[in-house]
Image: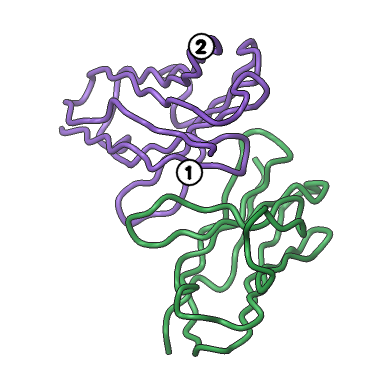
Amino acid sequence: EEQLLESGGGLLQRGGSLRLSCAASGFTFSSYDMSWVRQAPGKGLEWVSAINPSGDSTHYADSVKGRFTISRDNSKYILYLQMDSVRPDDTATYYCAKYIDLWGRGTLVTVSS
Amino acid sequence: DIQMTQSPSSLSASVGDRVTITCRASQDINNYVAWFQQKPGKAPKSLIYEASELQSGVPSKFSGSGSGPDFTLTISSLQPEDFATYYCQQYDTYPLTFGQGTRVEIK
C-alpha cells in the first residue's frame, strides 16, 4: 500500500527553524515528483514547493522562496522541507504529496509571534 | 501565476442531487487539472486527474470534464459521505495553484 507519513511539526517562535520529514513507502519513491502543500487553520490549500525525481530541480511559492528548502533522499525514501526564518503566517498543517495522487496525513506547524 | 477561479464557494444540496462545481483557468493548462475532496480534519483525497480521468478506486459517481478554460467536477447522485470541501488544482505550470474550494453542505 502506498503511504506517506509526515513528521517534525511543532511550536516555534518567529525567526526559528524546523525541518519536516515525509517518509514514503509502497511505491518507487525515486520515480516521482514530490510536493509540500500547506493549509492554514480554516483556510484553503496552498502549494509550497516541489522537487523532481532526481532532486536536481526545485520550485517554490513566492511566499517561501529564500526561506524554505526542499530536498529528498531517494535511498531512504524521505522527503524534507527545511523551514528557516519562519513567520506567524507560516502556521499551517503541512502535507507532503506524491505528484498529485497521494497525500500524507499532515503535520502541524505553529509559529508564535 | 495561473489563477484557478472556483465556483461556487459553497452550496447546499440534498442526498440524491446532482452537483456541479466549476474551475476557470486564467491561462491554457493543457487539461492538467486535478480535483480533490477534503473532509474536516483529514488530508485531501485525489478524485480526478487530467481533467477527466478517474483515480483508481474512486466511485464512478464522480466525473470531470472540460478542455479549458472551464473545467467541471460533477457528482451524479450526492450521498452522505460526499459532504466535504472540493478543490481544483492546475499542475501544468509552476507555481502549482489551487482553486479557493467549494464547501458542499447538507440542505
Chain shown in purple: A
Q: Residue at x 65, y 21 (%)?
A: A52
Q: Residue at x 27, y 30 (%)?
A: A9
Tag 2: amino acid: Asp
Residue B88 in the image, given as x and y percentages of width and height:
61, 56
Residue B38 in the image: above or below residue A2? below
Residue A7 in the image, given as x and y percentages of width and height:
32, 28
- Quadrant the C terminus of chain A occupies: top left
Find disc 2 in the rendering and name its residue: A73
Q: Residue at x 46, y 59 (%)?
A: B38
Residue B40 in the image: above or below residue A13? below
The residue nearer to you, when weighing A28 against A50, is A28
Tell me the CA gap for discs 1 and 2: 24 Å
Q: Residues within 10 Å of mark 1 (few under 14, many from 20)?
A: many
Residue B65 in the image: above or below residue A99? below
The chain letter under disc 2 is A
Q: Is residue B5 left or right of residue B43?
A: right
Query: Residue at the front extreme?
Result: A1
Residue B30 in the image, given as x and y percentages of width and height:
83, 47
Residue A88 in the image, given as x and y percentages of width and height:
25, 35
Find disc 1 in the rendering and name its residue: A46
Tell me, yes or no, whether dots 1 and 2 are on the same chain: yes
Q: Quadrant of residue B60?
A: bottom right
The chain letter under disc 1 is A
Tag 1: amino acid: Glu
Q: What shade has chain B been given?
A: green
